[in-house]
Amino acid sequence: MEILRKQFLRHVGQTSDAPLMIEVARAEGIYFYTPPTPEYPEGKRYVDLISGVSVSNVGHGNPAVIEAVCAQARDYMHIMVYGEMVERPQVKYAEAIAGLLPEPLESVYFVNSGAEAVEGALKLAKRHTHRTEIASFYNAYHGSTHGVMSVMGGEEFVGAYRPLLPDTRKLRYNCFEDLAQITERTACVLVEPVQGESGVRPPAPGFLEALRERCSAVGALLIFDEIQTGFGRTGEMFALLKYGVTPDIVCLAKALGGGMPLGAFVSSGEIMAGLRSDPPLGHITTFGGHPVCCAAGLAALTYMQEHRLAEQAEAKGRLFEELLTDHPAVVEIRRSGLLLAVELGSPERLYRAMELLKEAGYLSDWFLFCDTAFRISPPLTMTEVQVRECCAEIRAGVLDRL
Ligand SMILES: Cc1ncc(COP(=O)(O)O)c(C=O)c1O
């Protein structure tokens, strides 16, 4: 095991100075396991409290997803770059997604990742409006490519890469006053309906409606980034359904692929047509909408629907909140469905909590723009019994020891 860790540090490009360094041997349901050691002959078991950041919504090793992946891999994998061939898993998945979204969101452009979905959406908005200004929000995270970093809301992560895209504007999330900065110059406004990486900030009552109204009034496109909130996380299949606001474009990824890499941006047929001609090939992607990923995503979506996971997410999230909120170490809990931030009030307490969580066999994480709270966004398959067990262990093993 030690050799593998050394090879990991030497040969796998590192993104942080403090990787978790937990070796994974297998994963099932809400759990994953390390390889066996003398201390843990079955491997040490961890409860996955973050679902790979809102990816594994239908649980690890979901048999329906595995079956779909294997069947599709046997039929065919990559044939041709995106958009040329009629591939059944892609068509069927696009149809299913369109069926869940309000009109006119019916045209699904598949890509590989969340960042690529946002890139595609921004390009589409420029093409459609013939404008260049892009507005987004402070403390928003939309991905890590150059274009998307230009609209990311935290200068500490962005500064080293300037110059980035010109003509961008940052607004304050939940600030009605700032909406006046959206004008006839604005091509689009990009927003997470519930901000994730700022430490779970749901929209203020009426904020998304006012944003929609302002965008419509000045002819700017409204883009929802539902990459973290989509597929049941907030208690509805999509947060746009929860808040009853329909954007012009919605970006999807993470749970979209049922554990496989997949992204998409979805719009009306009319808007999407902007990428098709004059010039054509408005966005090119080799692997976007890979048939195995689409088959996995469709299987995961079907599983979610059959097991009513989105509908249950609110009650499970509420149970977490009820069982943790009265602990004296908890300053507050911010929540939307089964996406929670447990606020501890200081980075030091959070750092200590992360150590204790790991020791107790729980994988959590902090947030990119909030280093005082830990994240709870487990697979939506987590049962009520598991929620209760988890909260009792977190109280005794972590919160009581802070
Ligand atoms: C809200 C949101 N948008 C976009 C992304 C970027 O997705 P990806 O890492 O697949 O590029 C993330 C990833 O954490 C995210 O949380």
Image (spheres, helix red, strand yellow):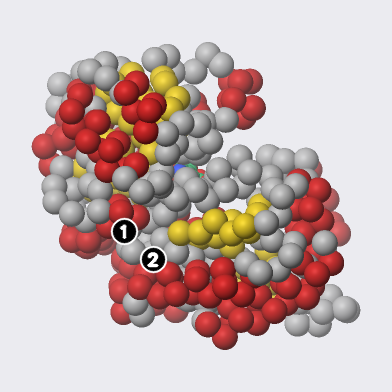
Q: Nearer the viewer, residue 124 or 195?
A: 195
* Residue 2 visible in the shown view: yes
* Residue 112 visible in the shown view: no
Residue at the (29%, 32%) spot, across then down? 283
* Residue 280 in which image quadrant: top left
SS class of the residue under badge 1? helix
Labels 2 & 1 near each other (Cβ < 8 A): yes
Q: Which residue is mark 2?
A: 235
Dot 2 or dot 1: first in sequence order is 2
Please state if 199 lies on the left or on the right of 398 as rendered: left
Q: Where residue 332 sits: x, y (%)?
A: 62, 57
* Residue 22 in which image quadrant: bottom right
- Compared with 351, 25 (above or below) is below
- Compared with 158, 82 (above or below) is below
- Compared with 379, 183 (above or below) is above
Residue at the (61%, 40%) spot, across then down? 369
- Report the amino acid beneath label 2: Gly
Q: Which residue is mark 1?
A: 242
